[in-house]
Image: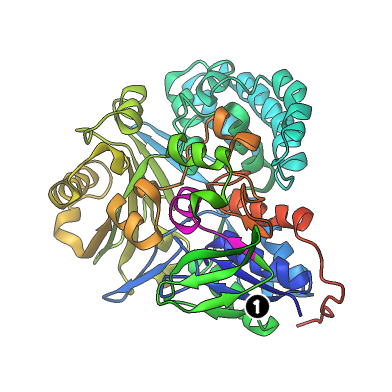
Amino acid sequence: MSRAVVVGGGFGGIASAIRLHAKGYEVQLVDRCPNLGGRAQVFEKNGFRFDAGPTVITAPFLFDELFELHGRRREDYVEFKRLDPWYRFQFSDGDIFDYGGEIEDTEAEIARFNSDDVEGYRRLVAHSEKIFDVGFTELSDRPFHKISTMLAQIPALARLKCYRTVWQMVSAHLRHPKLRQAFSVQPLLVGGNPFDTTSIYGLIHFLERRWGIHFAMGGTGALVEGYRRLMEELGIEIKLNATVDKILVEEKKARGVQLDCGALIEADVVVANVDPKHLYGHMLDSSQQTWAAQKKTQYHALSMGLFVLFFGTDREYPEIAHHTIWLGQRYRELLDEIFNSNALPEDFSLYLHRPTATDPSFAPKGCESFYVLAPVPNLNAGIDWKTNGPLLRQRIIGSLSEHMLPDLEKHLVTDFYMTPEDFKKDYLSVGGAGFSVAPLFTQSAWFRFHNKAEGPENLYLVGAGTHPGAGLPGVVSSAKVLDRLVPEVASSPIISAA
């Protein structure tokens, strides 16, 4: 039996393990966290439940596929519920923009701000669909380790003006400044600055429109638990609380991994669902990797960091949507400081998640569970989080109390937070970056870290820092790339129904 070891239990690693088993491999998954899910950990405190990772499901078919590979139905493991609205945007002056539902609902909201932008939005979605047809349908599961693959795509990408930034693409179709902000924030959900991120990521508009936005009942942790059950049924071995220290290489081929305790795990195939900068910087000797991998590790720019505040309240806030994006007075200037300065900005924009809007099981009766995410500079900025963490917590709670959650200070039952320091410590994220390397044009496709390792044979990379990029659809698709790279074992297991 051919053996495969998967390093990292995030969604990229989970999807890889399930796909490798379908190819006939005996699979072992190793992760340093106490539970599966990678950054999608689940915290329980004082009767409240908090999802620490992604909160939205787009392209649900990608998640269904992993069950269907083994004759199962996702619906038998976890329920997806479609949200409406998908997001609520709240601006600093109190204006509200609800985004989601049918396209007519979105157009009606747009018309409240500027009726001329309704037609512009239709053009934006049409252009997004064209990018989607190339960037997602054709390329998201295609390996890009050969320069010829990239060169073949240049004409199509040039026709779609993918050299433009997301902000430039949106501004070409919409005129109202608030609508431009609302329809350009999507890169922040994958770690990019809208003013720098390639408009390839403009495909997100059509991706959302095509399948809508869903929530996994029980949270993203419930989806992880569904995959854990599936892997247990398939006989995939899961080893938690174990950190892989290095990749074992013999005769220029990956032959397994060594844990930090010294234990060895031999394998014919190694899949790394880890930050590529950490992989090449700490898990492989420089002699075992290409010059290109070394340069990417040294020079590729990182995404921003994240400050995530989790809190529970002893009262309900029924007027708050499931997802709210609160945009402060500054937009371009704030993002420039987050991505390019060496100090913590005085103001912020926030992403507020209220899962109890859809699933009351996240909190005791009459209470609410929340998390609020603030983009912040990564650790390269040199911010002292021991000092600034408590200060930012208090500023965020004060702003939420003033603008969205009345008397929040009086109704807090429990709260705690994560800073970029925690992302570095818990997930070995270089620079404490929230999404590995930034989604710039010069860090996408062939320019990004390759799914086929730039070094030993039989070593493959998946996850946010690899092609096609961050976000749940991206990391799950990165595992789908393996179908084109990893050879199938001669005698694959028989697929059985649940």
Which contiguous range is marked in magenta? Answer: 270-284
Q: In the rendered picture of this protein, how many numbered marks are placed on residues?
A: 1
> Residue drawn at (49%, 54%), measured in percent from left and top?
285
> Residue drawn at (14%, 59%), measured in percent from left and top?
410
Quadrant including the C terminus: bottom right
| 37 up-or-down from 388: above or below | below
Badge 1 crowding class, 10 Å Cα cut-off, few under 14, some 14 to 19, many 20 or more, is many
- Residue 22 lies, in percent from the top left, at 77, 71
Closest to the observer: 441 or 397? 441
Judged from this view, the residue extending furthest toward the right is 490
Tell whether 340 sits left or right of 401: right
Residue 203 visible? The answer is: yes
- Residue 175 lies, in percent from the top left, at 51, 15
- Residue 480 lies, in percent from the top left, at 71, 55
Quadrant including the N terminus: bottom right
Choose top left, top right, bottom left or bottom right for residue 166.
Answer: top right
- Residue 379 lies, in percent from the top left, at 29, 43
- Report the residue marked by disc 1: 230
| 178 up-or-down from 1: above or below | above
Tell whether 116 sits left or right of 376: right
| 159 up-or-down from 468: above or below | above
Choose top left, top right, bottom left or bottom right for residue 207.
Answer: top right
Closest to the observer: 30 or 199? 30
Q: Secondary structure at mark 1?
A: helix
Residue 419 visible? The answer is: no
> Residue drawn at (26%, 58%), measured in percent from left and top?
417
* Display coloring: rainbow
Three-letter amino acid code at disc 1?
A: Leu
Q: Is residue 101 magenta?
A: no
Q: Is residue 281 magenta?
A: yes
